[in-house]
Image (cartoon, rainbow, N blue to C red):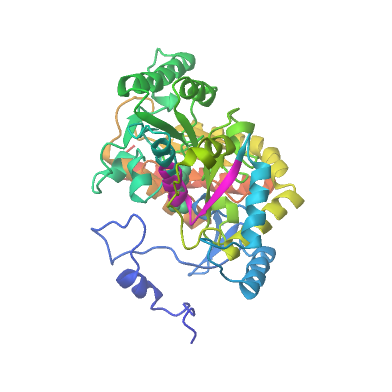
């Protein structure tokens, strides 16, 4: 047996005994029945029981080109054979240098300087550390507060988690004190019955400006925002939100960090969504996930020339940005990313996403008619349904609402679809290569899954 021959029965026992998973629930640790996938092709994974499941969330919003892509696998293998590693600290490798060049060609404005990281959290961490570093060099060490938003998710390192605003994730872990200020939720669904979307938008913009003014512009370093708050439940702020936010930031000398870990690399039909979809040129973009189509870990923090220029040469006072990783610009990851870019371009994947979007969004919105679904929202090839057992009542979530996402997921899996349950929501962001008939199949299963979950709830007298 080779060490990765995991088809044998004990894998579940090994998993329960030794694998500490992300977001591990400590009450049930060691006693989990997680789905195992053993193989995958295209947009489907095959579970250990042989069930073929359409991968609704594309892994964790990362498998842009689906599974079993031999071209990416070969590019990685070739690179590993040729040069598996070379330290990025005092040296470089041409694969990563080429990737930095290719990324810079695709970013908005003068975002031309790429700091490679190991994933999204380390990209966000690096962005925040860079912003602080710059303010230290500029002689304003008190300008450090990061403004973020409720429901934001920026990662799981201490600093990235400290600027994340998902309340349920924060209770049991310490936060870096004094780092972040959180703005209220920007989900238009939460506006009062009498409030127009335009008035809600004005309020959210005022939230940002008031926060900067009350904290003091001399103390606020940056605003960090996902274009769409993905893990927070695919929250799409009102039209024009980002443009107005960046204007406020510019007015008060506050940097704008656009966290495109989910929206980057094609999810909304463009390399990056900041400029092409939302009309803004941020100061820093962070990305990861889709960058290597999920084949191997990698992230990037992309910084504007203007920021770099403001603290380089004479202005730098001899400073070193002491931040980076053993695996920054790892050649094998860089080879996977270059191949991903090549395939996305050659196969017209960005166009394909834009062509598929109307059908995807139309099928998504139609789910809003179901009795359990309070909201069906999304953009590009990302969507979420939010559910409540008391649809229309406007009341707070019931305890049973918290189980609805998992109930729908379980029913969808029976039908051959994986979704990502998030409390009372399910989110989905399939591989970008999904075809029209597969989008229809996905939503047929999703609708059926929600109906089955509703039948279960009715049988239990809950709706
Ligand atoms: C917007 C955003 N930023 C950062 C991260 C963290 O990325 P990673 O899990 O690769 O560290 C995520 C992960 O889901 C994310 O959605």
The stretch of residues the image draws in magenta is: 112-129
The answer, for residue 93, to whether it is visible in the render is yes
* Residue 230 at x, y percent in the picture: 47, 40
Specify the quadrant of the image occupied by residue 216.
top left
Q: Nearer the viewer, residue 324 or 439?
A: 324
Whether 349 is among the magenta residues is no
User: Would you say 352 lies left or right of 409 here?
Assistant: right
Name the residue rendered at 58%, 31% in the picture.
281
* Residue 72 at x, y percent in the picture: 66, 63
Q: Is residue 454 above or below residue 18?
A: above
Specify the quadrant of the image occupied by residue 267.
top right
In which quadrant will I find the C terminus?
A: top left
User: Would you say 335 lies left or right of 222 here?
Assistant: right
Name the residue rendered at 71%, 39% in the picture.
355
Q: Nearer the viewer, residue 213 or 362?
A: 213
Q: Is residue 192 above or below residue 427?
A: above
User: Would you say 106 lies left or right of 446 here?
Assistant: right
């Amino acid at each position: 047996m080779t060490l990765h021959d995991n088809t044998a029965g004990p894998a579940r026992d090994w998993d329960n005994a030794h694998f500490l998973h992300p977001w591990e629930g400590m009450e049930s640790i060691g006693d989990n029945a997680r789905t195992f996938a053993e193989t995958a092709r295209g947009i489907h994974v095959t579970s250990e029981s042989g069930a073929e499941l359409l991968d609704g969330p594309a892994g964790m919003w990362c498998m842009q080109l689906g599974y079993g892509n031999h071209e990416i696998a070969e590019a990685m293998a070739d690179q590993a054979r040729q040069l598996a590693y070379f330290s990025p600290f005092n040296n470089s490798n041409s694969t990563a240098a080429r990737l930095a060049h290719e990324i810079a060609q695709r970013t908005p404005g003068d975002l031309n300087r790429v700091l490679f990281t190991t994933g999204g959290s380390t990209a966000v961490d690096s962005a925040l550390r860079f912003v602080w570093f710059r303010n230290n060099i500029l002689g304003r060490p008190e300008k450090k507060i990061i403004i973020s938003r409720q429901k934001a998710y920026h990662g799981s390192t201490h600093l990235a988690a400290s600027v994340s605003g998902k309340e349920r994730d924060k209770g049991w872990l310490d936060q870096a004190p004094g780092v972040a200020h959180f703005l209220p939720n920007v989900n238009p669904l939460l506006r009062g019955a009498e409030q127009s979307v335009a008035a809600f938008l004005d309020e959210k913009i005022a939230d940002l400006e008031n926060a900067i003014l009350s904290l003091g512009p001399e103390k606020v370093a940056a605003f960090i925002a996902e274009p769409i708050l993905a893990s927070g439940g695919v929250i799409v702020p009102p039209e024009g939100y980002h443009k107005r936010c960046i204007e406020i930031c510019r007015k008060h000398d506050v940097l704008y960090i656009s966290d495109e870990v989910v929206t980057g690399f094609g999810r909304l039909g463009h390399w990056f969504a900041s400029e092409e979809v939302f009309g803004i040129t941020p100061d820093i973009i962070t990305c990861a996930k889709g960058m290597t189509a999920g084949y191997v870990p990698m992230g990037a923090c992309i910084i504007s020339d203007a920021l770099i220029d403001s603290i380089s040469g004479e202005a730098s006072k001899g400073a070193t940005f002491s931040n980076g990783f053993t695996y920054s610009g790892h050649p094998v990851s860089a080879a996977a990313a270059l191949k991903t870019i090549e395939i996305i371009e050659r196969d017209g994947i960005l166009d394909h996403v834009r062509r598929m979007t109307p059908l995807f969004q139309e099928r998504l919105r139609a789910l809003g008619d179901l009795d359990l679904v309070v909201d069906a929202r999304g953009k590009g090839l990302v969507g979420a349904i939010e559910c409540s057992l008391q649809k229309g009542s406007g009341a707070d979530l019931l305890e049973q609402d918290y189980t609805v996402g998992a109930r729908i997921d379980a029913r969808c899996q029976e039908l051959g679809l994986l979704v990502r349950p998030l409390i009372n929501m399910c989110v989905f962001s399939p591989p970008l290569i999904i075809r029209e008939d597969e989008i229809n199949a996905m939503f047929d299963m999703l609708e059926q899954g929600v109906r089955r979950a509703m039948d279960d709830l009715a049988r239990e007298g809950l709706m």
